[in-house]
Image (cartoon, rainbow, N blue to C red):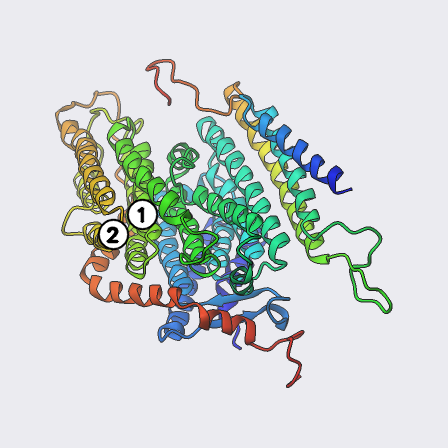
Amino acid sequence: MELLVASAIGILTAGGLYLVLRLRTFPVILGVSLLTYAVNVFLFASGRLTVGAPPILQDGVTNYADPVPQALVLTAIVISFGMTAVVVMISLGAFLGSDDDHVDDQPDETTGTPS
Amino acid sequence: MTHWLIAPVVLPALLAPFIVLAARYHIGIQRTFSVVGVLALIAIALGLTTQVFDGSILLYQLGDWAAPFGIVLVGDRLSIFMVLLTAVLALFVLLYAIGSGWDNRGAHFHALFQFQLMGIMGAFLTGDLFNLFVFFEVLLIASYGLMIHAGGDARLRAGVQYVLFNLIGSTLFLFALGSIYAETGTLNMADLANRVALIGAEDTVGIRVAAVLLILVFAIKATVVPLHFWLPSSYAEAPAPVAALFAIMTKVGAYAIIRVYTMIFPPDLEITAGLQGDWLLPAALLSVALGMVGVLAAKRLDRLVAFSVIGSMGMVMVAISLFTPEGIAAALYYIVHSTLAAAALFLIADMVRSGRDNLDLTAQPPIAGSALTAAFFFVGAIAVAGLPPLSGFLGKLLVLDAAFGADQVVWVWAVVLGSSLIGIVGFSRAGSILFWKAQSVVRDAETAASPPPAVLSYVAVGGLLALLVAHTIFAGQMHSYATKMAAQLFSPQPYIATVLETRGKLSTSQEGH
């Protein structure tokens, strides 16, 4: 299970990084989403991987799941979800306004320097 | 335990929804509540300052849960001082936003402004690393809205870059927090300080990765080269009052570096040795040089000011990365100077903008009220470039003096002094083109001159510059207080003891409950 989770995080991160380095906004936003999925799984795994263990103290149980990373990952999911929505809206506005969806500054056509 | 320590977070958090819900159609009511709220923040910060002045540590346990199980807010000299600086800056920025009418050019300026203040105050006060992430997000989310306030294509495009860069930064922050939690099992700063010191010398891979990731995140916020790319276009395209408020946001990164790397990973800690001197200092020196070269190379005034922010953040980081009490004291003195001077310059650039078609550094007809604006620009430029008699000069002197005993003293002196010269040339060039050459350009008959900036705008900028002058006149007192703050940072035991030994629910020692 450790191998599966670790390689899932690794593949998600690698894909996210590749997409983040792309030229246009849509792949970059997809890349950021992949990165946030990766970090959510990573945070979840930071409390060690346990199967079928209760997070709250109970009689006669010796193995527990760490509840803190689950709370942390909940916060992280909410924030990254909301922020992805925000960035989609802002970049849509920028694309519709300037008819250009490059993420970097385009050279100014009149002077040839970044505007 | 009094509740005053959480007031700087709660007050804006209550004011902002009130402004959205009750006063959304009445700009007058919004302005009144916003200004009154900021004045109250200043009063609270002053009250808290008197409590921590003697070096005592204020602790607020949310829900009365004891650390490290509950979240705590901690007020020591440094955090309360930063809260006070933020509140004072916010007042003048708000006055300018009202005077120039920026707050009425789009919806919800005041609500977002209050949320931004809430995030900044929380980031300064929190004693928990994950809470620091949450407050970072609060201030960033508010700043996304403020950044694209009043709209416009160029601003939206810069906004996309800004949001994307910060999203990646937040992801990195979460990776750092995850690895810290996996290694130590806690995220409370005081508890971390104890546990990191216990990690054996042979088992440090995870915690070293975490320390480097964390300093990368804070370096993004503090715009250390090569992580500065987001700053020039976002700060230049942001509305002027917002850019002026953002002057404190880079300092949140500097604050976080000071806090985490004096307490959790102190400079004498074996496992992170070399991170500060070998990596942070050269990067900071690069920032100083690149910022000042950018000032000289900029073709627009707003870009010029943005690059001067990179340069002055570089100076702060040079002083911090020495990680000596003298260095931190110099950094704290310079942080105040750099915040006020950068904010004033952004506002002055907006005053220039209001009388011209654009901010290109070319000779254009003189702007209305250019004599006073030029005088303000002159004072602001002297301050940022670090010429006598203003506090920039004293700050640089303190940084140079603090670097005197360090190994890299030659590099620090050469880069700081050399780039200061470049900065001076850059600012003189901009000032003479904007204000002197303009006198020889005749205005076309058909284009009417725009009215001069409002009196309130001048009051706001004048107030910031007056604070700079006061910062210079009372430099002795300021520096001695900065030295006390640094001394407190370098003996964190009272902080740690206060956080971990104050009783609350779930305290490990049960007697008394």
Identify the residue position indicated by label 2 in the image: B403
Say above or below: B276 vs B197: above
Q: Residues within 10 Å of mark 2 (few under 14, many from 20)?
A: many
Identify the residue position indicated by label 1 in the image: B318
Name the residue furthest front.
B202
Name the residue furthest right.
A60
Residue plotted at (59% across, 44% down): B175
Residue type at mark 2: give it. Answer: Ala
A41 vs A94, left or right, is: right
* Pointers 2 and 1 in contact (C-beta within 8 Å): yes
B326 vs B227, left or right, is: left
Q: Secondary structure at mark 2?
A: helix
Report the number of discs.
2
Residue type at mark 1: give it. Answer: Val
Question: Residue B442's quadrant in the figure?
Answer: top left
Where is residue B78 drawn, in percent x and y? 39, 63
Q: Residues within 10 Å of mark 1 (few under 14, many from 20)?
A: many
Where is residue B420 drawn, in percent x and y? 20, 40
